[in-house]
Amino acid sequence: MGEAGKAGKYAAEMSESGDEGESAKIIGSREEIKGTRRASYEKQWSIKWPADTFDEVETFDNLSIFHVPNKLRKVDDNAYSPRIISIGPYHRKKGNHELVTMIEHKCRYMRYFFNQIKDLQESLQVPLEFHLPIYNLDTTVRRSYAGGARDHDAESLEHMVSFDGIFILQLFLRYDQYCKKVPLTDQSDAIFNNAWMIPALRRDLALLENQIPFFVLQELYEVVKPRIVNYKPPHSITCLALKFFEPMKEKEMIKDEPGGTEYKHLLDLLHKLYHPAPCLLKAKPRSNFENWGFDFCACDLLEAGVVFLCNSDHSYNITFTKGVMRIPQVYIDDRTTSLLRNLIAYEQCSLSSTQHITSFAILMKSLIRSPHDVTLLREQGIMNQNWIKDEEYLTYFNGI
C-alpha cells in the first residue's frame, strides 16, 4: 500500500473511533505553536533591524575618502600609511609616536589661526563665522568617509576636522609666504627649519586615508583670507594647495579659475592635475582590467616596427599614433611611488573618477617584462635616472 493509501486508512480509522475531536485538538495545537513561533520570529526581526538601521549607511555617490583595499595594501603597506601626521579619522588611534608628536604643531598653528581672526573673537562672532558652517555640514562631512567617522559624534567630528583643516590651511599659507620671502610670524617654526619636514608632509597629505573634505578648507580660508594683513594671499585655497604640491610634479601647474573644477579632497585635486587631456575630465565607464588584452613588451613592439619616443607631457598620458608610441618620462623615488599607488587606490575605490592612472600603470607593466625592455626605454630618455638599475625599474612596475 502506498503512502497516500496509508494516510487514507489512518484517517478512516480515526473517524470510526470517534477521535475527530482529538485530531482537531492536535491540529489546533500545531497552529497555535506555529503562531507563537511566527510572533517570536517577528519580535526577533524587529530587534535585529531597528527602524534607523539604514540611516548611517553611506551612499556610494557621496563617498570620496576610502580605506585602501587590502589587495593593494598588502603589496606595500608603507606607501599608504602616514609617517609624521594623521589627518581625518582613519589613523587617529594607531598609536604611532611620530603621529602623536605632530599634535603640538597642530596646536601652534591653531593659535596662529585665532590670532588672525582676533577681531572675530573680540566681537564674539567666531561661532557664527567659523564653527557653525562646519557644524551644519556634519552630515556632508560624515558621508564623505567610507566608515571611520561613525565613532565620532557631531561635536567631536567638528573638532577633529577643524583641527586638521586649520593645520593644513596654516601650513599652506606659511609655505606661500616662505616662497615669497615674506617673514613668518614665528621664525622658530620647526616645520620650516627642518628640510625634511615639508617633503614628508607633502607625502602624507597626498595619502588616500589621510584626507578631509576639500570644502572644509574652503570654508576656513573664507574666514581667514579677509584678515590677512602682512601680505596679499592667493584668491583661493586651490591656488595655495597647488603651490604647496608643486614640487611633486614636473609639468606646469593647472590654473585655478573661479567657478571651475570642484575637488573632493587634496588627493582628488592631484588626480585631476594629472588628467592627460580635458576630454578625460568626464569619467568614462570603468574597465575590467582582469580582461586586459594588451600583452606585448617593449622589445616585441620594437621588432614589430613600433617607434618609442619620450612625451614632453608629464601627465601619465601615453599616446599611440601612426606607429609611434609616446610615453611620459618616468621618475621613481619614494615620493612618486607613494603618490602613484594612492592615485591608483583612489581610482579603484571611487565610482566617479577616471581610470587613467591605473591604465598607465598597467600598460607600463605590460611593456616592461625584462631588463632589456628597460634598456630600450632608457635609450629614448623615458627612463633617465642613471643611478637606478634596470632591475629596479623592472621590480617597481611588476610590484604595482
Image (cartoon, grey):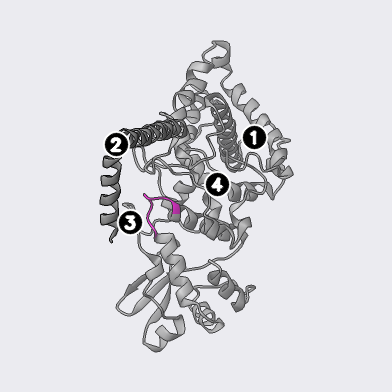
Q: Secondary structure at mark 1?
A: loop
Mark 4 vs 1: CB contact within 8 A = no
- The magenta stretch is 349-355
Magenta region includes residue 352: yes
Mark 3 vs 2: CB contact within 8 A = no
Q: Is residue 115 above or below residue 391?
A: above
Q: Which residue is labeled 4 in the image?
A: 209
The residues bearing labels 3 and 2 have C-alpha atoms spaced at a distance of 85 Å
Q: Is residue 220 above or below residue 261?
A: above
Q: Which residue is labeled 1 in the image?
A: 183
Mark 2 vs 1: CB contact within 8 A = no
The residues bearing labels 4 and 3 have C-alpha atoms spaced at a distance of 25 Å
Residue 193 visible in the picture: yes
Q: Looking at the image, tell me whether mark 4 or mark 1 is earlier in sequence order.
A: 1
Name the residue located 49 percent from the left edge and 68 percent from the top edge: 329
Q: Which residue is labeled 2 in the image?
A: 18
Q: Looking at the image, tell me whether mark 4 or mark 3 is earlier in sequence order.
A: 4
Q: Is residue 253 left or right of residue 13?
A: right
Q: Amino acid at mark 2?
A: Gly
